[in-house]
Amino acid sequence: MCILTTSFHSFNVKNNNNLSLNYTTTVEAKSDPFSKHHENGEKLKGKELYKAYAKQKCDDNGWNDAEYKSLIKLWNNESGWRVAAANPTRTARGIPQALAMHQKWSEKYLTDYKVQINWGIKYISRRYGTPTKALSFWNSQSPHWY
């Protein structure tokens, strides 16, 4: 959902014959597409915001709603969509549970949901092609991993 803000500016200008002309201008600006809002107008926060961002990234990648649902299931199981998620027995961190061997830990990665989701989408795309294939692989492993 895009939110547009509109403002109107009116002003009068007098020409050499002392005639008054009225001008009105309209300015529209898009808000940050990831400052999403609920239908009731409240701003999205936390996991809802992360999932909305992931939905946009799935769309950008050409993945349909079924792929997005697979991504939701995969990351619900991996991290519960927690930015600070850390696997106690491995080096996996963040929403996509990237291993240290795949992702050099930076403060930005460890704290920024956009960086984590971008990384996770690229990883899934390169390794599996789609979230559905990644989820299928995840389901075939015991213990689960992808």
Image (tube, rainbow, N blue to C red):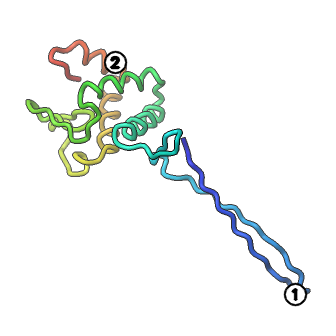
Q: Which mark is residue 89?
A: none
Residue 11, position in %: x, y?
A: 75, 74
The secondary structure type at the circle numbered 2 is: helix
Q: Quadrant of residue 118?
A: top left
Q: What is the crowding at mark 2: few (fewer than 14 residues within 10 Å), some, or many (at least 20)?
A: some
Q: What is the crowding at mark 1: few (fewer than 14 residues within 10 Å), some, or many (at least 20)?
A: few
Residue 22, position in %: x, y?
A: 81, 72
Distance between the Cα atoms at labels 2 and 1?
A: 73 Å
Which residue type does callout 1 highlight?
Answer: Asn
Q: Is residue 11 left or right of residue 79?
A: right
The secondary structure type at the circle numbered 1 is: loop
Identify the residue position indicated by label 2 in the image: 133
Q: Is residue 12 left or right of residue 123?
A: right
User: Residue 51, relative to residue 7: is it above or below?
Assistant: above
Instruction: Give 5 or 62, whichever is nearer the viewer.
Output: 5
User: Residue 1, relative to residue 129: is it above or below?
Assistant: below
Residue 20, position in %: x, y?
A: 86, 79
Specify which label sits upstream in the sequence, 2 or 1.
1
User: Which quarter of the rendered picture does the C terminus lie within?
Assistant: top left
Label pair 2/1, CB-CB below 8 angstroms: no
Q: Which residue sits furthest right? A: 17
